[in-house]
Amino acid sequence: MRKPQKPSVPLSGMYEIEIADHQDCLTIDEEFVRTIVRQTLQTEQVAAATISVAIVDNAQIHELNRQYLNHDYETDVLSFLLEMSSDPLAQQLPDTPRGNGKTIDGEVIVSAEMAIDMAADYSWESLDELTLYIVHGLLHLCGYDDLTADELPVMRARECHVFEVLGRPKPTRDASDQGHVDEARPFNGQTTKDQPAVHPGGQS
């Protein structure tokens, strides 16, 4: 995993996006992935971000899940919030996206193999399933969670909104589809370079 660094994108609305494709299950267009990341961050009104996306297979994400969360099984997405700061002048109204005014340094790891497996269950394309994992991980970095009955519908609504912005078919999950809720670790907003906030997956 990439070592935590302070975001190196001081200008508002500037994003540094790195893509690492470590699997051969699914053909990946890296520019398409960058577009997903960029538009999700813009939709969430994130001021600046340094984001890396690693696309792996089930064996690799299984090992990372075991290494970082002591969960001995495969998952769909892991997200690591390495650094986060907020603009104190950013408006935080009830309808404001939770990423508004934030500067984020984080990493999202997704399993393309899991996306292929689960796409059939939800009757849509593997690429859309993978896109959902990426968006879900980014929303965790922005401050959303899916641990409670109150928070889960909020996460699902934001996923659907981002997919609408992306011009992709909306996810078939609904607010009652809790996914991997038992995997999640609460995010209390307090992170350090030595102890990044870790958000496990929650889609399948």
Image (cartoon, rainbow, N blue to C red):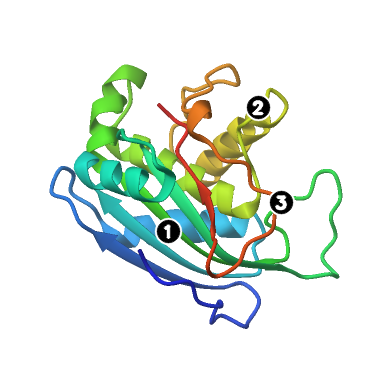
CA distance for labels 2 and 1: 25 Å
Above-or-below relation of 46 to 55: below
Which sits earlier in the primary sequence, circle 2 or circle 1? 1
Residue 25, image quadrant: top left
x 22%, y 37%: residue: 113
Q: Position of residue 8 (x, y in %)?
A: 53, 82
**Do the numbered discs 3 and 1 sit on residues whose CB atoms are within 8 Å?**
no
CA distance for labels 3 and 1: 20 Å
**Do the numbered discs 2 and 1 sit on residues whose CB atoms are within 8 Å?**
no
Assign the N terminus to one quadrant of the image: bottom left
Which sits earlier in the primary sequence, circle 2 or circle 3? 3
Q: Which residue is mark 2?
A: 153
Which is nearer the eye, 160 or 143? 143
Q: Which residue is mark 3?
A: 98
Q: Which residue is mark 1?
A: 35
Above-or-below relation of 187 to 178: below
x 36%, y 37%: residue: 76
- Mark 3 vs mark 1: in front: 3
Near mark 2 (Cα within 10 A), the count class, few <14, some 14-19 or many ≥20, is: some
Residue 87, image quadrant: bottom right
Which is nearer the eye, 23 or 31? 23
